[in-house]
């Protein structure tokens, strides 16, 4: 039963990290357009640059079903995402000076890459669990 629960958590998070990867790439485009147009950051633009994670990440009982390396990768990503969202909430003007602009652009590109990597790790784990559940004798 625990393995089945872990499988559900892993499947949800694999899809979630690929969704976040896509969102991060969209956010990068939004930031680029705002900077190029030298537009002020409205609340609507700010809302489009914030990225959330599935609530399962905050459920310690579900997260405790995962192997330590996936748990750690998820927490590291959550910390990076929290830093991104903090920066997006405090961003002013058209993303402030050149250093901050470069920082937020690099940050969101790194988030996309990190989300893709964590999503791949969850896919591998999910496939392993599926094989184990299909043929328990192989374990």
Image (cartoon, rainbow, N blue to C red):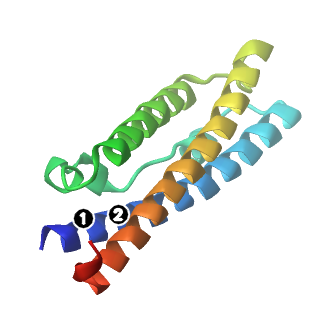
Q: Is residue 46 left or right of residue 102?
A: left
Q: Locate residue 46, reporting x and y percent.
A: 58, 39
Q: Nearer the viewer, residue 72 or 135?
A: 135
Q: Residue furthest right?
A: 36
Q: Locate residue 12, reporting x and y percent.
A: 37, 66
Q: CA distance from mark 1 to mark 2?
A: 6 Å
Contact (Cβ within 8 Å) of mark 1 with mark 2: yes
**Which residue occupies 39% across, 69% down?**
128
As drawn, 105 above or below 28: above
Q: Locate residue 68, reporting x and y percent.
A: 28, 43
As drawn, 10 above or below 104: below
Residue 23 marker: none
Circle 2: element type: helix
Quadrant the N terminus occupies: bottom left
Q: Is residue 44 left or right of residue 32?
A: left
- Disc 2 target residue: 10
Q: Is residue 76 visible?
A: yes
Q: Residue furthest bottom?
A: 134
Q: Is residue 71 left or right of residue 1?
A: right
- Residue 103 quadrant: top right
**Which residue occupies 29% across, 54% down?**
55
Q: Nearer the viewer, residue 114 or 69?
A: 69
Graded by Cα atoms within 10 Å as few (under 14), some (14 to 19) or many (20 or more), the crowding at tag 2 reads: many
**Which residue occupies 54% across, 61% down?**
19
Circle 1: element type: helix
As drawn, 21 above or below 11: above
**Which residue occupies 59% across, 52% down?**
116
Q: Nearer the viewer, residue 126 or 14?
A: 126
Residue 6 marker: 1
């Amino acid at each position: 039963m625990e393995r089945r629960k872990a499988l559900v958590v892993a499947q949800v998070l694999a899809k979630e990290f690929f969704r976040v990867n896509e969102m991060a790439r969209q956010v990068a485009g939004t930031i680029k357009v705002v900077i190029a147009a030298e537009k002020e950051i409205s609340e609507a633009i700010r809302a489009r640059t914030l990225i959330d994670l599935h609530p399962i990440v905050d459920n310690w009982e579900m997260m405790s079903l995962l192997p330590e390396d996936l748990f750690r990768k998820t927490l590291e990503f959550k910390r990076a995402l929290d830093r991104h969202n903090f920066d997006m909430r405090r961003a002013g003007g058209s993303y402030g000076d050149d250093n901050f602009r470069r920082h937020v652009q690099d940050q969101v590109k790194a988030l996309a890459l990190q989300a893709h990597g964590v999503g791949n790790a969850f896919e591998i784990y999910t496939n392993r669990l599926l094989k184990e559940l299909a043929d328990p004798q192989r374990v």
